[in-house]
Image: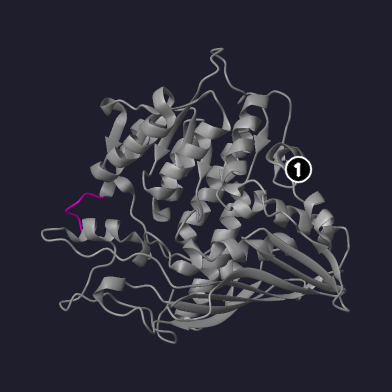
Amino acid sequence: MNENKNRKNTLNRREFTRRSTLLAGATLLGSNASALHASGSDTLKVAVIGCGGRGTGAARQALKADPGVEVVALADAFEDRAAKCAKVLRRVGGKRATVPEERIFTGFTAFREATDLADVVILATPPGFRPEHFEYAVSRGRHIFMEKPVATDAFGVRRVLAAARKAHEQKLNVVVGLQRHYQPSYLEALERYRSGAIGDIVAGQVYWNSSGVWVRPREAGQTEMAYQMRNWYYFNWLCGDHILEQHIHNIDVANWFLGELPASAQGMGGREVRKGADHGEIFDHHFVEFTYPSGAVISSQCRHQTGCVEMVEERFQATGGSLFTSGGNDAVLKNRAGDTLYKHGGLFDPSPYQIEHDQLFASMRAGGHIDNADYGAHATLTAIMGRMATYTGKRISWDKALNASQRLVPDSGDLHWNSAPPTVPDDAGNYRVPVPGKTRI
């Protein structure tokens, strides 16, 4: 495809927002009970729940999305995280993001006070807390942006699905941070696939193979709870393992493009380089085969090991060709002969991280209704099903995953800095790591 054709495929943010509203799940309904504002104010009050890098970034995107957005409250388990977030937002948002000390809340239950002050909440804590925070926000009638995944266990997924039904009844806007649903390259590729350009997908491979994430050392005098909260990525009750916390993006794309949910999963995984007390209880590699009701089989790879091939992408084989997508704005469709039918030329596409906030606040202004909660919960459960398969070495059905009795996360009211976390180390400081063939769910 020549350069001019590539340039034609590049969408600016305004044009993309207009064209992608339906595909992204936003249905503008005119006016409804959740339209803002009954008071007549143009201000949209935002509370940030979880003040780490993602929460701070999402708040910045909210400020950019709508000139009437004001960040009015912050909540985080840690005082230093909340203070750092406040400083950053004050610098970038000025008066619209200058949160007074009396509206900066800390501790395990701080989310309640912050939520009560807002019209919109950004839920960006470690994902283990997401179900409780989402439930509470829905009960208070708040519009919601929540990061993925939306839970770390099936119990949490069921809570989210139940709360999502209530959110839907209230026509609350709920956007989930699976931003590929808002990314021009993915939406353009999906539109062409659904038009029949390459037939039906029969197989695929999805990847998140990278070198891993941060490790934070244990500090002198630190309680076990504080240590795990700082190193949340390495504990299943907080993170859910990287097949869930990170690879959910690619797994979600498979569900989305196929238009169905997997019937079963089987796979393998383990720890080769991620060893010792510093790396908690999660694996450093997973390989899962997801089988779908249509008969399609998706192979899923995720790896956190340095010095290895790194790839974050999706590849699908269809009856009439193939499809390739990646988070780097790549999308290519080919026929069976290998001829390129479509190549996305969106080198300068708008950021999907920004688009999801643009659409959230635009929908609120219009009295519309965006409802991402169900597909967020389904993607979460798909990744959890994969984790169950690798941890146990067994074939796991969708129904078994959904109805699993395992509950990893206590309610926030039962947690404090001196309480024992759900998992604790042995006398040598090591944590129990799942063993395929022996571990049970």
Q: Nearer the viewer, residue 139 or 186?
A: 186
Residue closest to the far top: 40
The answer to whether residue 395 is seen in the rendering is no
x%, y% of residue 350?
64, 46
Could you classify mark 1 by the number of other residues whose Cα lies within 10 Å: few (under 14), some (14-19), or many (20 or more)?
A: few
Q: Is residue 258 left or right of residue 198?
A: left
Residue closest to the far front: 3
Q: Is residue 408 above or below residue 267?
A: above
Q: Is residue 42 above or below residue 264?
A: above
The answer to whether residue 40 is seen in the rendering is yes
- Magenta highlight on residue 418: yes
State which quarter of the image contains the C terminus: bottom left
Q: Which residue is mark 1?
A: 22
Residue at 75 percent of width and 39 percent of height: 15
Residue closest to the far bottom: 437
Q: Is residue 137 left or right of residue 215?
A: right
Residue 380 figure quarter = bottom right
Q: Nearer the viewer, residue 387 or 177?
A: 177
Residue at 49 percent of width and 84 percent of height: 393
The magenta span reads 415-420
Q: Is residue 167 left or right of residue 106?
A: right
Which secondary structure class fits the magenta region best?
loop
x%, y% of residue 253?
66, 62
Task: Give the amino acid at mark 1.
Answer: Leu
Q: Nearer the viewer, residue 82 or 294?
A: 82
